Image: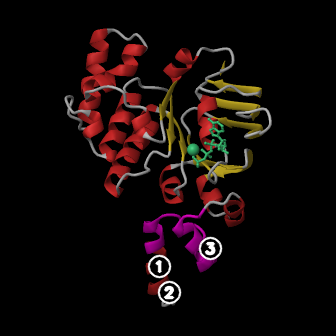
Amino acid sequence: MIRFENVTFGYSDDRLILDDLSFHIPKGDFVALIGANGAGKSTISRLTNGLLHPTKGHVYLNDKDTLKTPSSVLARDCGFLFQNPDRQICENTVKDEIAFSMKAQGWPVDKIKDRVDKVLETFELDPEWFPFSRSRGERQRIALASVLVCEPGLLILDEPTTGLDYLECIRIMDYVTKLNKEKSITVLMVSHDMELVQSYARNVLVLNHGKLLGQGPVKDIMKDMDLLKKARVLPAQIPELTLRFGDEFKDVFTVEEMLDALRNRTNKGGAL
Ligand SMILES: Nc1ncnc2c1ncn2[C@@H]1O[C@H](COP(=O)(O)OP(=O)(O)OP(=O)(O)O)[C@@H](O)[C@H]1O
Ligand SMILES: [Mg+2]
């Protein structure tokens, strides 16, 4: 679905942001891209959807070389939720906002109406709301709805839950997970929040100063404290605790698994 081949990129000639970066994300995967501030995560997102082009190397989206494909064509394959929803929202009503991308892509009017009505219902949004007067969580939901209405094969989420409360966060992430599982939509999620990464991602790419430090299944990466430290990322709490508790807890990854393991240990008469 996404292929970076020896990608080098700089916003200016005198400073490289990405340095000879190669990786592949297969269709249907749910990948988290993690790394410290300024590591180059958002730059990777913008290279993937053709908003930026590599200085050297190639980026392929669905086997289309982004250097040779107009961004209007790439946009059909790739929905992009910006770090800040207010950079995305541009219409005065929710219904116009959600219809905006479908109109821009030239969909037939009846198809637009069907999809917009369905998305409004799914996301529990009022069609007449003025988007900018809504809460941050509602604006994020509006922005996500307007991306998903086009049913893209790839969804890029750049810090999707910043500024959301716990329930809003769960609501959005559960919806994205459902799409990933039921419709095989590929998800690339940029996040600083390792609790979020641990709960939702299947695989992880670790970026540091524009280079890939590591990649692998979320369970392995979240327990690799040396790697996370090098990438200047704070580990999630449960994987960190399991390492301190020793071998008996090596398969524990979630809060529920931790509670079960602790109950087992107490039942056996062990100390906590
Ligand atoms: N439009 C731009 N022009 C010049 N430099 C930029 C531009 N956008 C980003 N940069 C620089 O490129 C580097 C990588 O930025 P990027 O936004 O990709 O990092 P990030 O990993 O997404 O960081 P954050 O976690 O803070 O969002 C940073 O040093 C940043 O200052
Ligand atoms: Mg960023």
Q: Main secondary structure of the magenta part?
A: helix
Q: Position of residue 159 (x, y in %)?
A: 49, 46
Q: Position of residue 82 (x, y in %)?
A: 48, 37
Which of pointers 2 and 1 lies earlier in the amino acid sequence? 1
* Residue 158 lies within the magenta run: no
For the record, the magenta segment spans 234-259
Left or right, 45 with reference to 65? left
Q: Position of residue 79 (x, y in %)?
A: 48, 29
The local crowd at label 1, few if under 14, some if 14 to 19, many if 20 or more residues have their Cα within 10 Å, is some
Q: Amino acid at mark 2?
A: Leu
Q: Amino acid at mark 3?
A: Leu
Q: Find disc 1 in the rendering and name its residue.
A: 262
Q: Amino acid at mark 1?
A: Leu
The local secondary structure at tag 1 comes to: helix
The local secondary structure at tag 2 comes to: loop
| Residue at figure coordinates x 57%, y 18% from the top left | 71
Out of 142 and 29, give the one closest to the viewer: 142
